[in-house]
Amino acid sequence: MEYFKDDLKWEPKAQTPLRIVIVGAGIGGLVAGIGLKRSGHDVVILEQVPEIAEVGAGIQMAPNAARILGRLGLLGQIMKEANILEMNSLRRYANNAELGTAPLMPKIAETYKAPLFMIHRGDLQRILLEGAKREKVDIRTNHKVVEVDPKFEPRVKLKSGEWIEGDVVIAADGIKSDIRGMMMEKHGVKDRSQPTGDAAYRVQIPKDKLQHDPEALELLEKNVGMRWMGPGGHIMAYPIKKNTVYNMVLLHPQKQGSENNESWTNKGDKQEMFDFYSKWNNLVKHLLTYVPDGEVMEWTLNSHRPLPSWIENKVVLMGDACHPMLPYVAQGAAQAIEDAGALAMVFSITPSVHLALGIYSEVRKSRAEAIQQSASTTRHALHLPDGPEQEKRDTAINGAGGEQGGKNPDLWADREWQGFMWGVDVMKDTWEKWEEYRAKVEGHHLAGLNAATYT
């Protein structure tokens, strides 16, 4: 397949098939279900909604996720729906001046042996759901989990009162994870988040709205990402759906007194959006005039502290349930897919649930949390007020674009940080360093991990 070169010789085959219960049929839950089913396990996914709908907006898939999707036989179909960006353009908010560029495809694929692309979340969700059904994963909608076993044995209680049992429970129940809350309650700590002070608008502009605006239409038709940086906010914009929709995510200060509700279903105020970006360049302001009334969605951005553990007995967290990602480095879906790939790998090697989960935690926890925590660094760099620090940032961005390339203050565009985010192959790492990870896990009982303090 073009752009994907796999150097991992892995034939997924479980030593002992297990019954695995996954709570949540989002991106991470579906990829985990597919990987574990292909490994020979009996997989049931419990999803609370009556119907899994194709909702959302554009998301980025980086090489660290794309290579896992490739191994699971999903990448070919996904790429048919994707937009492949050639570069990212980093720009000043006021005059639209280009500060620097970050080359993307095909250079990224040549470097990391897997592509970087943009896709509508709904298209990705549909392809993953179709893939799970092809693998005969047992997906049960309208099955809301309300309780987990008090001792975190692998069984969960549904709203109907029925208990579902397995050999392991994987909580892929998202940023508002009830199972995470139950785990934290066991530790005697409050499951809470901290507002960043930012919120984000999400808008999608269809091509027919731009037909009489040559400058805006050129943006839609070119496979270039635009990243405008200004005081207190930034904008990331790019085409999706084969250049028929322009996708924009607009970061801005959270309105005083607004609820810290982490959901894309909150309606935003179009006039408030205009007010904040009133001093930005004319191109941005023109684009915002095409946003249909009533279709501005707003998301409050909260940061989540690292958890003491992702594991409690035979119950484990994955994705946003354990490491919710802020959008500054565009790794939310990718990190959930890394979790899924690591889980598929560990359960293809050992039938021991405790060993598998311990190694999963060793492979994933510190890495995911490092990427999670990098968001604050990137946020600071992107939202600087005009002044000496902003001028120093702009000079650094300009200097980072050359062949030698220095440090880029925007970590998403920084070559060294890209190597860490995109170059690490968690499945290959698990496979090749299995004995090393096993020694670490068996060297300290998992109960010691679970006894970690959380203050």
Image: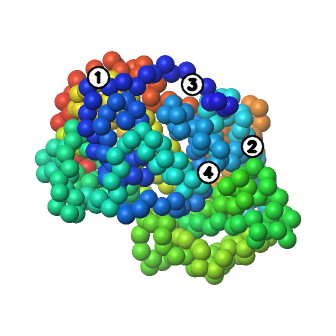
Return the mark for residue 125: none
Quadrant into which the N terminus falls:
top right
| Label number found at residue 15 | 1
Q: Identify the image quadrant of residue 364.
A: top left
Dividing the picture into quarters, in which one does residue 113 lie?
top right
Q: Label 3 crowding class (10 Å Cα cut-off): few <14, some 14-19, many 20+?
A: some
Which is more foreground, mark 1 or mark 4? Answer: 1
First-in-chain label (3 vs 4): 3
Is disc 2 in contact with disc 1, using a CB cutoff of under 8 Å? no
Regarding mark 2 in the picture, which secondary structure is present there?
loop
Amino acid type, callout 3: Asp
Horizontally, residue 53 falls left or right of residue 222, namely left
Which residue appears at 77% of the width and 32% of the height?
A: 403
- What is the secondary structure assignment of the residue under circle 3? loop
The answer for how far apart the CA atoms under marks 4 and 2 are is 15 Å
Who comes first in sequence, dot 2 or dot 1?
Answer: 1
Mark nearest the camera among 4 and 2 is 4
Q: Position of residue 115 (x, y in %)?
A: 63, 36
User: What residue would you read off at disc 3?
Assistant: 6
> Distance between the Cα atoms at labels 3 and 1?
24 Å
Q: What residue type is labelled 1?
A: Gln
Q: Distance between the residues labelled 3 and 4?
A: 22 Å
State which tag comes first along the sequence, 3 or 2: 3
Q: Mark 2 points at which residue?
A: 86
For the residues bearing labels 4 and 2, Cβ distance under 8 angstroms: no
Judging depth in this view, the residue of 108 and 167 nearest the camera is 167
Type of amino acid under label 2: Glu
